[in-house]
C-alpha cells in the first residue's frame, strides 16, 4: 500500500453538504445530514460505521442507484444530483463498478466465471472476441485464471468475490464501490479479496471505495473515514510505510464546510457536556468546556 498524501488535483469523488431523506406515508427518515467527503483519484479507502450511520445510503448514491435530496455530489465530471434517468443508466454501465456483500447478487449461477465477466461487456456493445480476452485478463489479475470455466457453485466464497470484482471492472470503470465485500468471509479469505483489490488498483488506477462495519479494515487500506448519524465524523490515515513495517493509523476529527465537528461520545460523557459549552482559542488550540444548561426564563 502506498502512503496517503494530500491530493494536488481535484478529488475524483466530492460530496458537499449532502442530505438524503427517505419518505414513507407515515414518516421521514434522514439518512444523511450534511455529509462532506472527498476521495482522491486512484485511492483505496474505506468508510466504516455502525448500522444506520448512513454509509450504505452514501454508497448507493455514489453508485447511481439513488439520488441525494440536497447537496452536491460529483464523480469525475458528472454531477449526480442533476443527471436524468438515461444519464444514470449510462453512468452505471460505464463509469462505476459495484460489488455486493452477498455473492449470489454478483454472479449469474448458470454462467462460468469467464462468461460472467463477458456479460457486462457484451451488454455495453463490446464484440465477443474482445470481451473474452478482457475476461481472461481480469481473471488472471485476481488469481483465478485456472477457474475461468468454473461456475459459481464450483468456487469458494472468496473466489466468487474475486470474480465479482472482475465483473465490476469488466467495462474499465474509473470507480469501484464495494459494500461489505468480505462480510461473509473468514479472515484469510478476506485477505485474498483485498489483495485482488490492491492488485487491480495498482494495475489500472481505479479508485476504490469500500463500505464496512469492521474496524479491522484499517489494517488493509491507508485511509478510513468513520460515519456517525449521517455525517463523516473522523478519519484514520496511515502517513507512511517503511518496507513491511507500517506506521500506526493516525486519527483526526473531521470539520465540515459549515465548521461542524462531531465530538466522540466518550468525550461528551467524560466532560459532562449537555446542550451548551464554552469554546475558547488559546494560541494554536481550542479549549472546550461544559457550561451549565440554564432553564428558560418563566
Image (cartoon, rainbow, N blue to C red):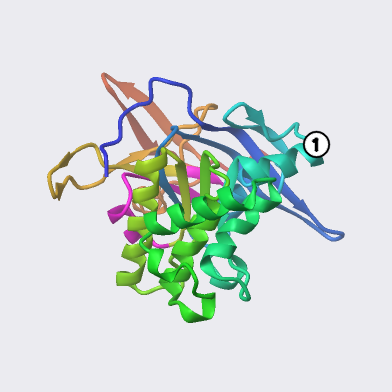
Instruction: Tell me the element at label 1.
Output: loop
- Given residues 36 and 6, the one toward you in this image is 6
Q: Residue at x 34, y 42 (%)?
A: 202
- What x and y, as percent, mark residue 124? 68, 46
Q: From the viewer's perspective, is residue 72 above or below residue 206?
A: above
In-image side of 273 versus 249 (left or right): right
Q: From the viewer's perspective, is residue 128 above or below residue 162?
A: above
Q: Is residue 221 magenta?
A: yes
The single residue placed furthest to the right in the displayed view is: 25
- What x and y, as percent, mark residue 290? 40, 41
Q: Residue at x 27, y 21 (%)?
A: 284
Q: Is residue 239 magenta?
A: no
The single residue placed furthest to the bottom in the displayed view is: 153
> Could you tell me which quadrant the C terminus lies in?
top right
* Numbered range of the magenta stretch: 214-232
- What x and y, as percent, mark residue 173? 55, 42
Q: Residue at x 59, y 57 (%)?
A: 118
Residue tagged by mark 1? 84
In-image side of 147 versus 23 (left or right): left
Q: Residue at x 47, y 66 (%)?
A: 161
Amino acid at each position: 500500500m502506498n502512503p496517503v498524501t494530500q491530493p494536488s488535483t481535484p478529488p475524483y469523488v466530492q460530496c458537499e453538504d449532502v442530505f438524503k431523506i427517505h419518505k414513507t406515508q407515515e414518516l421521514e427518515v434522514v439518512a444523511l445530514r450534511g455529509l462532506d467527503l472527498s476521495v482522491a483519484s486512484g485511492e483505496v479507502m474505506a468508510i466504516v460505521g455502525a448500522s444506520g450511520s448512513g454509509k450504505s445510503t452514501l454508497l448507493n448514491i455514489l453508485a447511481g442507484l439513488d439520488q441525494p435530496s440536497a447537496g452536491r455530489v460529483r464523480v469525475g465530471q458528472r454531477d449526480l444530483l442533476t443527471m436524468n434517468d438515461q444519464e444514470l443508466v449510462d453512468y452505471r454501465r460505464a463509469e462505476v463498478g459495484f460489488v455486493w456483500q452477498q455473492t449470489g447478487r454478483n454472479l449469474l449461477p448458470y454462467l462460468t466465471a469467464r462468461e460472467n465477466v463477458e456479460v457486462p461487456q457484451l451488454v455495453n456493445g463490446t464484440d465477443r472476441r474482445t470481451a473474452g480476452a478482457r475476461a481472461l485478463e481480469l481473471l488472471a489479475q485476481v488469481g483465478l485464471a485456472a477457474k475461468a470455466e468454473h461456475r459459481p457453485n464450483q468456487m469458494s466464497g472468496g473466489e466468487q468475490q474475486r470474480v465479482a470484482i472482475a465483473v465490476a471492472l469488466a467495462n474499465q470503470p474509473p470507480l469501484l464501490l464495494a459494500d461489505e465485500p468480505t462480510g461473509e468471509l473468514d479472515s484469510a479469505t478476506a485477505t485474498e479479496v483485498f489483495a485482488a483489490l490492491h492488485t487491480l488498483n495498482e494495475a489500472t488506477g481505479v479508485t476504490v471505495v469500500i463500505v464496512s462495519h469492521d474496524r479491522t479494515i484499517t489494517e488493509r487500506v491507508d485511509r478510513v473515514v468513520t460515519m456517525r448519524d449521517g455525517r463523516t465524523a473522523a478519519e484514520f490515515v496511515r502517513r507512511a510505510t517503511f518496507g513491511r513495517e507500517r506506521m500506526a493509523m493516525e486519527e483526526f476529527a473531521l470539520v465540515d464546510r459549515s465548521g461542524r465537528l462531531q465530538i466522540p461520545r466518550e468525550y461528551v460523557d467524560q466532560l459532562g457536556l449537555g446542550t451548551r459549552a464554552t469554546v475558547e482559542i488559546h494560541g494554536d488550540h481550542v479549549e472546550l468546556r461544559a457550561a451549565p444548561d440554564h432553564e428558560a426564563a418563566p
